[in-house]
Image (spheres, rainbow, N blue to C red):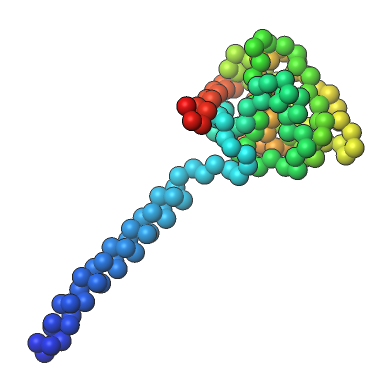
Amino acid sequence: MASPASRRRSARRAPIRLAATLFSLAAALLACSESAAPATPPGPPVEGWVTIRDQRVAVEIADTPAEQSLGLGERDDLAWGRGMYFPYAQPGFYAFWMKGMRFSIDIVWIHAGRIVDLTPNLPFVRGSNGPTVRPSRPADAVLEVPAGYATAHGWQAGDSVTFERLPAPGR
């Protein structure tokens, strides 16, 4: 049987043990909730999302002629799950090349919210602009993703594509 002094010490420690237990539980729940949330792949700020076959890709948007001309040039890589989206006001047979690129990509040609063509594993050629490619059908948007990404997710002509532009910061 515990002595009265032992019971008093135990009673004084009970709130401390309870607080420690609650803190540990809260920390564990926070860790679980953060790991369950989909993470944005590393890279420049996300300006929008493209969804194809339930696969969301965080994208930068190249809307100006200067951004479209540079594209992914002068970069060393593109993280898996990231891309660059090129919207166009009118459908056309837009030409793409690998100027200044240092990694291979897949190009997804889009018209009216559907994939109309794919150019998988377009290689960069060191010291060169590489091949120039165009879609087989007119496109009003283009998505560039890391080489192998489209195939890994089973994307094909006819798949539905949704594009969501995020509000600009400060608006």
Residue 14 image-quadrant placement: bottom left
Q: Residue furthest left?
A: 4
Tell whether 54 sits left or right of 117.
left
Q: Nearer the viewer, residue 136 or 37?
A: 37
The residue depicted at 69 percent of the width and 40 percent of the height is: 78
Tell whether 114 sits left or right of 25.
right
Q: Position of residue 57 (x, y in %)?
A: 58, 34
Residue 135 visible in the displayed image:
yes
Residue 158 visible in the displayed image:
no
Q: Quadrant of the N terminus?
A: bottom left
Q: Nearer the viewer, residue 125 or 158?
A: 125
The residue depicted at 64 percent of the width and 12 percent of the height is: 89
Tell whether 35 sits left or right of 5.
right
The residue depicted at 15 percent of the width and 77 percent of the height is: 11
Q: Is residue 18 above or below residue 54?
A: below
Tell whether 8 sits left or right of 31.
left
Q: Nearer the viewer, residue 112 or 44?
A: 44
How many marks on residues? 0
Residue 105 image-quadrant placement: top right
Q: Position of residue 47 (x, y in %)?
A: 57, 31
Q: Residue furthest front?
A: 170
The residue depicted at 36 percent of the width and 55 percent of the height is: 29
Q: Position of residue 154 (x, y in %)?
A: 63, 32
Q: Residue furthest right?
A: 127
Q: Position of residue 65 (x, y in %)?
A: 72, 20
